[in-house]
Image (spheres, helix red, strand yellow):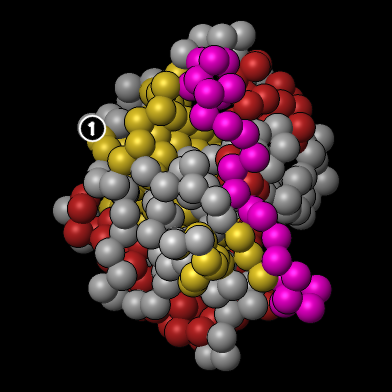
């Protein structure tokens, strides 16, 4: 019997015919089936797809026990206000990194290096008035016996995936290593399940830290963004080789993973490769 269910509520694509609405961004409903605890991991960029897809799947927003924000970028945090409105003022704990409300920027290389504000589009006060109870952290947070928010992920096993990300320091823009990037880890009978938003911390770091933190010996599944879009030459191959070496049961890489990584992943992982997108469901 499955102890965990992960359902993707927001993603850039809907690869199969579906009544669900795609939107640039990411959100997944993670359910601990033993305790009944529901965790909304990220909220998409606008709230429009989140609202429609929750309704289509018959999920009452008021039944969500925790919201976890993987990092402060708008395509993962922008739907938070709409979710709170849908809950009708019912308070909910929102677990996020201490940097949640810090500005964030990116240089868009495809648009000639245009600088864009990509941070959380809502202010803390308005979100708290709607029922958000922020738990801002740096270290791990245990939500249930089997679900843990990673906190900051050490960069000990590989590079970060933070190319083009910028933050303010001393009044000037500097490279942002995305230390606020967090994952959600679950322990299931088959090993570790890691859910990522963009994976800015780097795939090897996310997986290896999850194994260390959870005490699990193997990777059962990896679901979410791996931020391989625009990766430096050779990086896709490194990630593919690493994931193949872990012999996972399932990998569903979506959102910012990028289309050029999908074919190598499928070829290397064989039956473990899953076509992600809005509506994708994993039970473990």
Furthest residue in direction bottom, as rendered: 233
In the foreground, 102 or 206: 102
Q: Residue at x 25, y 46 (%)?
A: 139
The residue tagged with tag 1: helix, strand or loop?
loop
Total labels drawn: 1
Q: Which quadrant of the view contains residue 39?
A: top left
- Residue 114 falls within the magenta-colored stretch: yes
In the foreground, 96 or 220: 96
For the record, the magenta segment spans 108-132
Q: Residue 122 vs residue 13: left or right?
A: left
Q: Residue at x 21, y 50 (%)?
A: 214
- Horizontal and vertical percent for residue 121? 64, 40
Tell me if residue 75 can be seen.
Answer: yes
Q: Residue 211 vs residue 93: left or right?
A: left
Furthest residue in direction left, as rendered: 215
Residue to which mark 1 is pinned: 145
Q: Which quadrant of the view contains residue 211?
A: bottom left
Q: Quadrant of the N terminus?
A: top left
Q: Residue at x 52, y 29 (%)?
A: 124
- Horizontal and vertical percent for residue 165? 55, 67
- Horizontal and vertical percent for residue 89? 56, 9
- Horizontal and vertical percent for residue 6? 50, 40
Q: Quadrant of the C terminus?
A: top left
Q: Which quadrant of the view contains residue 79?
A: top right
* 112 w.r.t. 81: above or below: below
Q: Residue at x 32, y 22 (%)?
A: 35
Task: For label 1, count other residues whose C-alpha is less than 10 Å away and answer few (under 14), some (14-19) or many (20+).
Answer: few
């Amino acid at each position: 019997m499955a102890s965990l269910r992960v359902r993707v509520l927001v993603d850039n694509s809907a690869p199969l015919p579906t009544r669900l609405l795609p939107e640039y961004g990411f959100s997944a409903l993670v359910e601990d089936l033993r305790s009944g605890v529901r965790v909304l991991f990220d909220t998409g960029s606008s709230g429009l797809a989140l609202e429609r897809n929750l309704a289509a799947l018959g999920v009452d927003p008021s039944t969500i026990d925790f919201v976890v924000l993987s990092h402060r970028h708008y395509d993962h945090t922008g739907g938070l206000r709409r979710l709170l409105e849908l809950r009708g003022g019912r308070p909910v704990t929102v677990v996020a990194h201490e940097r949640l409300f810090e500005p964030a920027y990116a240089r868009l290389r495809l648009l000639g290096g245009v600088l864009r504000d990509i941070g959380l589009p809502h202010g803390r006060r308005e979100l708290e008035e709607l029922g958000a109870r922020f738990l801002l952290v740096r270290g791990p947070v245990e939500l249930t016996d089997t679900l843990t928010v990673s906190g900051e992920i050490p960069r000990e096993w590989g590079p970060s995936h933070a190319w083009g990300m910028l933050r303010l320091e001393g009044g000037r823009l500097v490279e942002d290593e995305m230390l606020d990037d967090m994952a959600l880890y679950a322990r299931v009978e088959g090993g570790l399940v890691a859910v990522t938003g963009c994976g800015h911390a780097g795939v090897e770091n996310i997986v290896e830290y999850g194994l260390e933190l959870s005490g699990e010996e193997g990777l059962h599944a990896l679901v979410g963004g791996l931020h391989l879009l625009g990766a430096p030459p050779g990086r896709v191959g490194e990630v593919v080789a690493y994931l193949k070496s872990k012999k996972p049961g399932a990998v569903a890489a979506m959102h910012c993973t990028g289309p050029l990584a999908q074919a190598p992943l499928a070829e290397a992982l064989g039956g473990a490769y899953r076509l992600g997108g809005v509506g994708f469901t994993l039970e473990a």
